[in-house]
Image: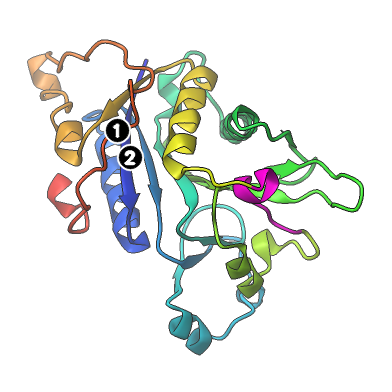
Amino acid sequence: MVIHVLHLGLVPYGTALELQRTLMQLRKAGRIENTLLLLEHPPVITLGRNARLDNVLASPEFLAQRGVELHEIDRGGDVTFHGPGQLVAYPIFDLRSFEPKVGAVEFVRRLEEVLIRTCGDFGIATQRIKGLTGVWTYALRNKPEAKIAAIGVHISRAVTTHGFALNVSTDLEYFDLIVPCGLTGKPVTSIERELKRAVSVDDVAVSASRNIGRVFQSQMLWLESLDDLMAQIAESPATGQSTPVPANQDTPARAPKELRELHGDGGELA
């Protein structure tokens, strides 16, 4: 099993949303392999299917002044924030392609496992909390447990979109604009806050990719661009041919060079 990985850098939320939708359709048609998008967003608040608008504490005018966008979307969960310094991962996976097949609840549990292992790679012990989704630090003396990563997914005909957001060097003051995930009195944290030192989002992306490969028992093939992804599209099923898959590249020998800025809305991929 191969998962293609694209590290896209800073991408506007609307652009990434359109790209996910396009790749989802291509995955449903069997024209691409399972694909993982790793990126960051400019400041944006998103409201999932179960979100309440009153969990956004700031007015539209104030958000506009701060340059924070607001999007209502089809993922599960409540309200959350995305911004620079936060690693966002969007797996475009066909859950039927894994052996054995992966169900919706198991998929979320696996994403939590990826996050727990990734935080562990940086020396941060994290946990699941019964009845809640996401990953949390442990409570210590005079320090409550805090949420370090959020998960919200959408599944259509077994193909996933949306995913997880892991706070690396995120400006946590933005979370004061919302009730994160609709949970009052629950603080948020980041890798940098826990370690009290700078951490590269690129380094965390490499760790997260490696752990997705381990948890989903797949080879991770890093691609340089969207053009490279499209070059992997299988030929028409009528031909009975497919594009050869390159040898395993679990993680790059070095972090992939910065990809060119993503332009357009992904419509050229359709």
Is the C-beta separation of discs 1 and 2 under 8 Å?
yes
The residue shown at (50%, 81%) is: 63
The residue drawn where x is 66% and y is 51% is 193
Q: Earlier in the sequence, mark 1 or mark 2?
A: 2
Q: What is the residue that sits farthest to the right in this orientation?
A: 141
Classify residue 65 as left or right of residue 248. Answer: right
Q: Is residue 189 magenta?
A: yes
Query: Quick one: label 1, few (<14), some, or many (20+) residues within 10 Å?
Result: some
Residue 3: image tag = none
- Magenta region, residue range: 187-196
Q: Which residue is mark 2?
A: 7
Q: Is residue 226 magenta?
A: no
Residue closest to the far bottom = 61
Q: Which residue type carries mark 2?
A: His
Tag of residue 256: 1
Residue 111 in picture, x, y percent from top left: 57, 34
Q: Is 80 placed above or below 244 here?
A: below
Task: Find residue 25 and report its image quarter.
Answer: top left
Give the label, 1 or 2, closer to the camera.
1
